[in-house]
Structure formats: C-alpha cells, structure tokens
Image (cartoon, rainbow, N blue to C red):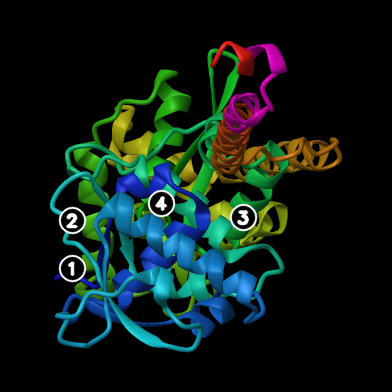
Amino acid sequence: MLIQDNLHIQISKKILNLEANEAYFYSILSKSSLLDGGAMVHLPQLAEMLGVSNRTENRDKIKQSLANLESNLGFEYYTDFQLKKRLNLLELKGTQYFYAKVPSVIDNFLKMSLGDFNKLVYFEEKECKQMIMFQYLYIVGMVNESGKERKISYPTVEGIAAATGFDRKTVFRYNEILVKYNLIYMDTVTIKDKSHNKYSRWSDKEDVIEAVAEVKITGYISKKRKTQHEGVVETTNKVVAKSTTPKNDNTGLDPSIDKALVGFVKAGLAMHKGTKSKINEAIEICGVEQLIIGIKELDFICRNNGIPESKWAGYFSNNIISKAKERKKQVEAQKRANEKLMNEPVTPTIDYTKTYRETQIRLKEMEKEKKIEEEEKLMKSLSLFTDEQEKPKEDWLLALGI
C-alpha cells in the first residue's frame, strides 16, 4: 500500500525515465490507491482526464502506457477488487473496469502534495496537462528532501528540455503556468555574470527568497539553510497566530505585507503615515508579491550582515523604494528575455523513446523480410533439385541401365 505522509503521495523517481503519459497515469493511480493500495481503472475515464476522445487508438495508447508502468515499475493489474485474479492488458476490453495495484516506494522517490496533484489534474489550460505535470515532477524531483539543505533545485532550462524532451520555448511556457498556479516558485540570480534559475515548491519559496538575498551579500549560494532564517519563519508564524504584540489591524495594507513586516515592526518600525506612504509607493512600483520578496531580502540582510536591531527600521525606510525598483527591473528583464525566447522559432521536439521503438520495429521488419527471402531462395533451390530428379532420362542412359 502506498504510504500517505501528511497528504502527500510518493512517486518513484524512475518515472522520469519514462514519458509524460506514464507519469500522469502513475500520479492518478497513486492518489486513487492511497487508502488500500488498489485503484479502480476505466480506460474511458483516463482518456477523459487526458483530454482525448474515447477512440480505440487512444485506448490502445493508454493500455501501452499502463503496460510500461507494469514492466518498468512493477504495477500489477487485476480483474477483481480483492486483487487476486491477474489481468492481461492485451485482452482488456475497452469498457471493462479493472484494478491496479501500485507498488510501495521506500527510497529514491519524490513527494507530491494532494493539493498540487489536484491543481495539476484539474486546472484549465490549453496545454497538455500530462506534459506540465512531467516538468513539475522533474523540477521538484531534484530537490534534496533530507531537511538539512534548502529545498531548492537548480536545473537549467537546457537541462529540463533535455530531460523532458520539450523545447526551450515550451519549458519557459510551462514554468509560467506552474508559477501562475502556485505550484513552483522560481527566481533568477546572477553569479559570476551568469544568470541562474532557482526553483522550489511554492510552499518552500522562503528558501529561494533567502538564497537570492544571500547571493547579493556573498556572491554565492550555500546549500544549508541559515539558522537565523529558520528562526524568522518560525517567529513569523507564531506572531501571526499567537503574538501578544499589538497587531497592525489599521494599517490598511495587504495582510501578506503586514506579515512580512513583522520582524521590522518588532525592531521598532513605526507604521505611521510616512512609512505607509513609502510602502504604498513601493507597491505601485513593483506590486505586492514582488514587494514581499523585497521586504524579506531586506530582513535577511539585516539579520545576516551585522546591522544592529535598533537600526533596522532606518535601514528599511532608506532602502524600501530602491529595493522595489530593483525588483521591478529584475522582473522586467526576465519578462523581456522570455518574450525574446517566445518569438524564436520552435525547435521540433524529439521523442527519443518513440524513435527508438520505431527503429526497433524497422529492424524486426527487415529481419523478417530477410528471413522470408532466405526461405524463398531455399525453396527455389529445392524446386530445382526436384525438377532435376523428375527430368526424363536420355535414351543412351536407358540403354546403359542408368
């Protein structure tokens, strides 16, 4: 039975060696089998979830994907819910219900929260859901889950494209969708004059924000999460839930802004008219979401750059506008880069697995044709020998008694 851990499903990283359809069906069957390890399967329903018509050729492709899960990852299929009578997928009728047993995953797996699963399966986008999920699984699959390091992955666009078989333009488009639905968080840092994307699950975005702030101070990113930052996050959660400090109920600001400002308010930042005016100006410059990132970067600098707590409020007031402009500039630069890439000609996607299979089929057909040709030559030789045997003997041979 698949292990359930705080409403997560565990997916073997071996799925990244297969294709997007296999990964999509793996996730669906894993979620359905959380309770008892078995999932009811109906090909027309899988076709509907995949966004294709319930035609014979589409059902055959789905059966092939399920067969790949069976041969590569140990899935088992049964005709009964007690999982006793094994099923041969090749003999499966199009409308027949059956059951899948999903193997347990003990190590070398990635986690997908049920919240993320539901977004990936049910969001409304024109692009193929299974391909977007495949890219999501690749990005979060590169995160170190040990807890000792920041939960960040560092794949390049080229690396994602090579692993998924998508072109670079498609990778950028899918990243935009994943960010839009709060599935991943990403930001770009510049190290030694080169831009690098940093990714995390949306729920772990604090790690990326901290890493980006660290680069600006040190010029590099350390894998280990800063102790001070862990304290900031913990304190923030406690202040929001249980703090006895007077709340900024009348600031008139977005609640997420108030939450990000907790460290500065505790350090003495007065939320008077001048402070709120600067914050509103910063919001006009870069927007709420980017401003929150900027505030957290300022917070990180104060905590990790030796600035006395008594001077945090002044540092905030002196730098909040410039930080908002910096965030706006960075977002616009990234947007221009994306637009430039979107206008580039699309490189045709190479399906290496399909190419390999087609090559194997051609080789088998050539081998079969060669065998038929050899059999025909053999039959022709036998025919000539038989004709020679049956040919009427000459008179002089008969006279000699031969």
How many angstroms separate mark 3 from mark 2 (CA)? 52 Å
The residue wearing badge 2 is 105
310 or 197: nearer the viewer: 197
| Circle nearer the viewer, 3 or 1 | 1
Q: Amino acid at mark 4?
A: Lys
Q: Secondary structure at mark 3?
A: helix
Going 46% across and 83% down the picture, which residue do you hit? 93
How many angstroms separate mark 1 from mark 4 (CA)? 27 Å
In the image, which residues are magenta? 379-397
Q: Amino acid at mark 1?
A: Leu
Could you tell me residue 115's position as x and y percent?
Answer: 38, 73
Q: Amino acid at mark 2?
A: Val
Q: As drawn, is 57 to the left or to the right of 209?
A: right
Q: Secondary structure at mark 4?
A: helix
Could you tell me residue 123's position as x and y percent?
Answer: 58, 75
The residue wearing badge 4 is 205
Could you tell me residue 400's position as x and y percent?
Answer: 58, 11
Residue contact between numbered discs 2 and 1, judged by CB atoms under 8 Å: yes
First in sequence: mark 1 vs mark 4: 1
| Circle nearer the viewer, 2 or 4 | 2
